[in-house]
Image (spheres, rainbow, N blue to C red):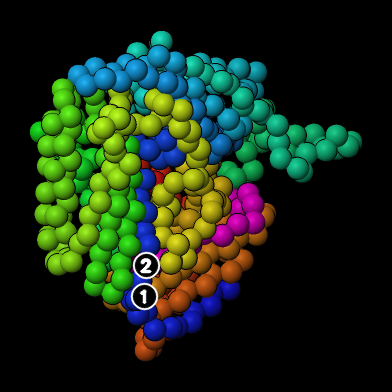
Amino acid sequence: MNINITSKPFLEDPQEFVERKGIGHPDTLSDALAEKLSINYSNYTKQKYGAILHHNFDKVGLLGGSSNVVFGNGYLIDPIRILLNGRASTKFGNEEIPVRKLLISWAKEFLAEKFPMIDVEKDLQFHYNLSNQSSPGKTNETGSEKGTRKYWFEPRGLHDLQEIKKLVSNDTSLGVGYFPHTRLETLVLKIENTLNSKEFNKSNPWIGSDIKVMGYRKINSFHVTMCIPQIANHVRSADKYKANIESARNTIYEVARSLKIKSLELNINTRDNFETTELYLTATGSSIESGDEGLVGRGNRINGVISPFKPMSMEGACGKNPVYHIGKIYYIAAQQISEKIYKNFGIPNEVYLVSQSGRELIDPWKTCVVVDQGFIEIDKLRKFIEAEHKKIPSITQGVLDQKYRLY
């Protein structure tokens, strides 16, 4: 195996930026919807046909509608548009798969759960753009019917699913992971997770889910600027709106204290203008109601944050096929291996997995691991990584069981 282990000092940078797009942000919603569609489709085809059929929903998008909002009341005027993009197997043997019907049904379930105040029949508009064309590799030359590419999205039977015989990478790509989180990453994550928790929402029904947090740290001084939407039906006046902001502010300072952060500058909803009543007041709690758009892969990385000071990949993991798609499998594997290295060896580290298209999944083309300077158990670590490579196929079931955070 091509495993390269190097070392460097893992010292905290004197400054860093970290961003977190909340669960109601259009980009995060797109990631979550794409992943739900992939998991549901995988379970459906696995139960019905005995295997997860080929699909990718990692190009799903959401286009914002429009709303009418006043204190005490908010509703949609124009529908939220759902772009069902990607590819999926539409046939198995002689049986047609009702892909369009299934995806629309699952998307309605998803958005009804996220936004119970909307009417999924009236407030959603679907644009179905799926293809069942194979990526390059399929030809029409004589003898091509003996291969599998021609039947990639219309398999004649299980024998056309090459991954059942030999599991190989579908692409050449990079997966990255690192652990542990920095202090700022931990703060940013905990702020959004707390404000979007069921516990906080139960006692604060006014809060929307499209919470965005941008954090900056310079040595031990922390600075956070963020947006917190409010749901109009639960906010009767400007005074109530202001009181809600102060309630959230107090909660955020409690989060900081729990992390032993002593210096925190906090800014919330800096664009609010009470003279013109231009406020982050919404019907649904998300900017998806008012023209904002979301696309898979533009939001949080699979460790929950956007950290430009740390290694990251531009792959959008959500919605990708959980059996062989490197943009998902190696990204998860790299993060899992990194966390396990920290747990088993107690060292900060970075993990990079690079595939080769057509190469066996459990044999990455390159594995690069960077560990803290001074670590000496290199042979033991190498054997540990080799063992983790062999476990990569088990990630598929972990995805179906929603074991991993992907956004």
Q: Which image quadrant for residue 124?
A: top left
- The residue that mark 2 highlights is 16
Q: Is residue 297 above or below residue 356?
A: above
In the displayed structure image, the side of residue 204 where residue 104 appears, left or right = right
Disc 1 residue crowd, few under 14, some 14–19, many 20+, Cα 10 Å: few
Q: Is residue 150 above or below residue 6?
A: above
Residue at 30% in and 20% down: 69
Q: Residue furthest front?
A: 275
Residue 250 is situated, as x and y percent measured from the top left of the image, at 11, 49
Residue at image position (52%, 72%) is: 368
Q: Position of residue 248 (x, y in %)?
A: 16, 43
Q: Where does the magenta region start and end?
A: 167-182
User: Label 2 near label 1: C-beta < 8 Å?
Assistant: yes
SS state under label 1: loop
| Residue shown at the point (60%, 17%) measured from the top left | 96
Q: Which mark is residue 305?
A: none
Q: Which residue is mark 1?
A: 13
Rendered location of residue 286, percent (x, y): 34, 31
Residue 270 falls left or right of residue 390: left
| Mark 2, secondary structure of its residue | strand
Q: Residue furthest top?
A: 122
Cα distance in 3D space between marks 1 and 2: 7 Å
In front here: 318 or 144? 318
